[in-house]
Every structure is written in structure tokens, then in C-alpha cells.
Image (cartoon, grey):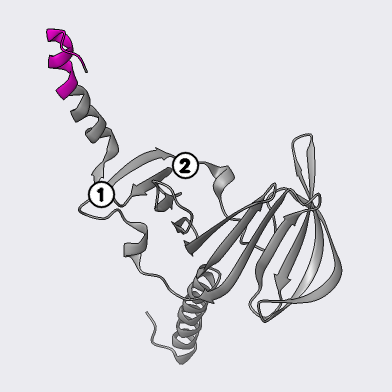
Amino acid sequence: MLDSPAMKKSAAMALAGVVWLAAGMDAWALEFMADQITRIDGHSRKALIYYRDDRWRLEHFDAGPVNVTIVRKDKDVMWLLLSRMRHFKTVPYDPEQAPKVREQLDGEVTREAIGTETLDGHPTTLYEVTVRKGDRKDVYYQWLATDIKFPLKLARKDGSWVVEYRHVRLKPLSDFLFQLPVNFQPLEEFDQGESEERAPAEKKGEPM
């Protein structure tokens, strides 16, 4: 079938094209870890984020029962880990919680470069970006790092919401970061067990 040199050369070129295309697709996949600082109406929160295109992990710095949040967009769920209790709670995936870590924002209609600035050691271009969702229009400032093509900072123009990424490291991440720990139990089963233990006492009229 591929006896002639010309046909062999054509087949080799086609195979090389497929390999190049696959490599190019992989090159667009975004994986990184960074410190994430979010400020909403003057209140700040900090987390360590591990991100891969359809999943991400947040290790929270602020005090609270939930130490880690694992988001699995591919499974349409979010896992809230309560490390001290070794339990987790499953909640539906909320698209509004997705990090805005791509250059183009969802619903973007206009973009204008308005300046330059250095953030966290990276040269950035400052853009004013207009986004439309239905009848609502929002305006953001975006600081896009020109060396790593990453939005280091995003803020509403009115200042009510700001998210910033520091110490960004673009690198492959382990699958284990986005999986449930094997020794964690569903919080729903824990709650159900407590309810079953209370039921006999309630039937006997004993005080709780």
C-alpha cells in the first residue's frame, strides 16, 4: 500500500501533523499552583489553589470547619473536607465559584489596554474589560502577566471584589490533589448515624 517513496513521505508528514496537533492541544491545558487572595467588600480570604482545567483544590488559611475544598467540574460536584473530623460533605458544583484564570472572561464584549504595571515580579498589561451577562453589564480591571500569559489580578471597577494570585507556578499537578482522601467518610452518613441513635431515645420519651 505504501510502496512508493512519495506515499511513505506523505504518510510520515500526516503522522507528524497529528502528533504536533496533539502536543499543541496539551500545551493549552492550564495547570498551576498559587496563593489566592480574595477581597470582597473589604474582607480578605487567603487560600492555596491547585488548578487543572476541569478541577481545582483550595486549601483555606482562614479558621473554619472546612479546611479544603475540592471542585470537580467533570463530576459536577464540590467536596468540602472537614479534616479534624475526617469527614467530607458533597454539594453541587456552582459555576459562579470557578476561578477566572483565563485571559478572556466569560461574556466579554470589549477589552482596552490602559497601562502597564509590575505585579509579583511579573510585567503586566492592565486592561479594562466589559462583560455582559443577560441584561447586566460589569466592568473589570485585569492585570495580565505578559511573560506567563496569566491574569495575576482581576477587580471589579467599583472595587467591591478583587482576586489576586501570587507566587504562581505553572507546573503539572498530581491527580491525588483532586481526589477524596481514602480515610474520610461522608458527613451525610455521620448525620444519619446520629439520627438513628437519637430515634430510640425519642420513642421512649427520654430527654435529649
Task: Give the overall secondary structure of the magenta segment.
Answer: helix
Rendered view: 99 above or below 174: above
Q: Residues within 10 Å of mark 1 (few under 14, many from 20)?
A: some
Residue 160 x, y percent position in the rendering: 74, 48
Q: Nearer the viewer, residue 93 or 16?
A: 93
Q: Nearer the viewer, residue 66 or 63?
A: 63
Mark 2 and 1 residues: CB-CB less than 8 Å, in contact? no
Give the magenta range.
Answer: 197-207
Mark number displayed over residue 86: 1
Rendered view: 153 above or below 90: below
User: Element type at marker 1?
Assistant: loop
Q: In which quadrant is the C terminus drawn?
A: top left
Q: In which quadrant is the N terminus drawn?
A: bottom left
Q: Is residue 203 magenta?
A: yes
View extreme (bottom): residue = 5
The amino acid on which the numbered mark 2 sits, given as a three-letter code, is Tyr
Mark number displayed over residue 93: 2
Q: Nearer the viewer, residue 187 or 17?
A: 187
